[in-house]
Amino acid sequence: MPVYVYAIAPTSHPLHLDGMTGVGEPAEELSLVTEGDLAAVVSDAPEGLRAKRRDVLAHQEVLAGLQEQGGVLPLRFGALAPDTDAVRSALGERAGAYQERLAALDGCAEYHLKASCEEDVLLRDVLTESEDARRMNEEIRGGHGGQQLKMALGELVSAEVTARREALGSAVVSALRPLARELRMSDAAGDDFVSVSFLVERARQSAFLERHGEIAAEYGDEFSFRLHGPLPPYSFVEGE
């Protein structure tokens, strides 16, 4: 029978499951699958499971309850295995990798940061600060240069905006990087110039949050900083 997998933990983890229930309606009972020094927290997999609010919250609550007791490798919502034998086999085959990541994530949480700035702000800055862009723009506004100059200006501005986005993202990451054990970059979308997850030790989380607040204040109201956390370290389950 298919099983739903919530997390992997060392068998030294307390793994108290009393009072905890899993996904499904009615909620499925949690159990353990063990192999060597590792255990997986699982339940039966409900038929037709989808990312409904109730089930997503149930998944998160299981992980929160486990992490209060000790470090685990959190699996993302929807992790399924054909049966408990398949789970046991995976624990045995990947024991070394799982144990390495458990050690790396011990005592840590994930913080995911997205930061954005509207393109109009960056365009304004380019036209203000780039001598070439300002000159070309003035010529066009004066009725000179024609279509070729407009195209050249568009290419210049686009390249400058891209360079500024990259520089902004690099500066923000560099400012927070010393307070994180690891980080994972992801593709920024829309007006975002950075999308990054930080793995932060419990002892450094207050300093991390304080530094984030300082950075947001330094950049000002034209920038939007959205920090989510502390989260289970989903982005760091796999090694670099």
Image (cartoon, rainbow, N blue to C red):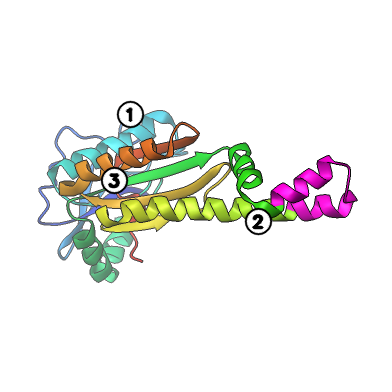
Q: How many marks?
A: 3
Please name which of the two marks, 1 or 3, marks the residue nearer to the observer: 3
Q: Secondary structure at mark 1?
A: loop
Which numbered disc, 3 or 2, marks the residue that appears first in the sequence?
2
Say if the magenta span includes residue 169: no
Amino acid tagged 1: Pro
Residue 159: mark in rendering: 2
Most common secondary structure along the magenta stretch: helix
Q: Which residue is mark 1?
A: 26
Tell me the magenta residue range.
133-154
Which numbered disc, 1 or 3, marks the residue that appears first in the sequence?
1
Amino acid tagged 2: Ala
Q: Position of residue 236 (x, y in %)?
A: 33, 56
**Quick one: label 2, few (<14), some, or many (20+) residues within 10 Å?**
few
Q: Secondary structure at mark 2?
A: helix
Say if the magenta span includes residue 149: yes
Q: Which residue is mark 3?
A: 232
Please name the residue shown 77% across and 44% down the image.
Answer: 138
Please name the residue shown 26% across and 45% down the image.
Answer: 208
Q: Is residue 216 above or below residue 183?
A: above
Q: Position of residue 148 (x, y in %)?
A: 86, 55
